Amino acid sequence: MFNSVKKTSFDKQVENILGLKPTNIALYTAALSHRSVKESPDENNERLEYLGDAVLSGIVADYLFKRYPYKGEGFLTEMRSKMVNRQQLNDIAVKMGLKKITLYNKIDNSLRNSQIFGNTLEAIVGAVYLDKGYKKTQQWVLKQIVIPHMFVDDLESMNKGMFAISPTANPIFSKSSSVSNPNLNLCPSSSASLAIILFPN
């Protein structure tokens, strides 16, 4: 009886946070399970993260391709890299409430401040894809991630500003920008500040 109530409660949490009703809840349980609590590849979210990363990238690429019919490949690639970079996905995941239902080793303080929640978001995309199919996943990503959290007009304006300064500059928001571009000299709170500017609530 207790397990049944617990499962129903979890189902409801997933439904409320994601804004969709899971058909196969096992997929979402796996997507929300970090390897620190589930070591087996078929139980943790690493495989779903791999799949979700590809699906999300494809959906964003399709969105940008149709939104900017006259822009070149370089512009489109730059915009996509800003929209799906690891830090921003992590911030979006936290804002969506995924941190509350992600299963991970909470004793490990390093995980609390890491980017595992962005990885979880990608895994969720993978779960939605397997559960609902591509078309519904595309609609869900646009409704729950792109529209409310990725303000493309602001990113486009920053994109123009960056290229005005230096056409060959590294993307500020690439997944490896903090390592590959040390000359940025950002303070520790810069990521959070920039997230507030680009992705306000």
Image (spheres, grey):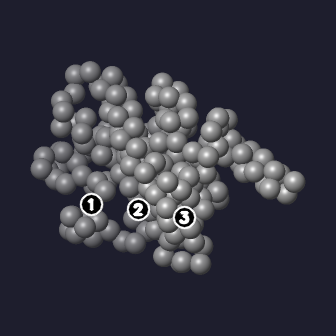
**Quadrant of the rendered structure where residue 176 is?**
bottom left
- Where residue 136 appears, as percent x and y from the top left, is 53, 27
Residue drawn at x 49%, y 35% is 129
- Where residue 93 appears, as percent x and y from the top left, is 53, 52
Badge 3 element: loop
For residue 117, say whether it is visible. Answer: no
The residue beneath circle 3 is: 38
Residue drawn at x 53%, y 38% is 128
Badge 1 element: helix
Q: Is residue 196 above or below residue 63?
A: below
The kind of residue tagged 3 is: Lys
Q: Which mark is residue 177?
A: 1
Disc 2 residue crowd, few under 14, some 14–19, many 20+, Cα 10 Å? some
Residue drawn at x 22%, y 36% is 75
**Quadrant of the rendered structure where residue 156 is?**
top left
- Where residue 182 appears, as percent x and y from the top left, is 22, 69
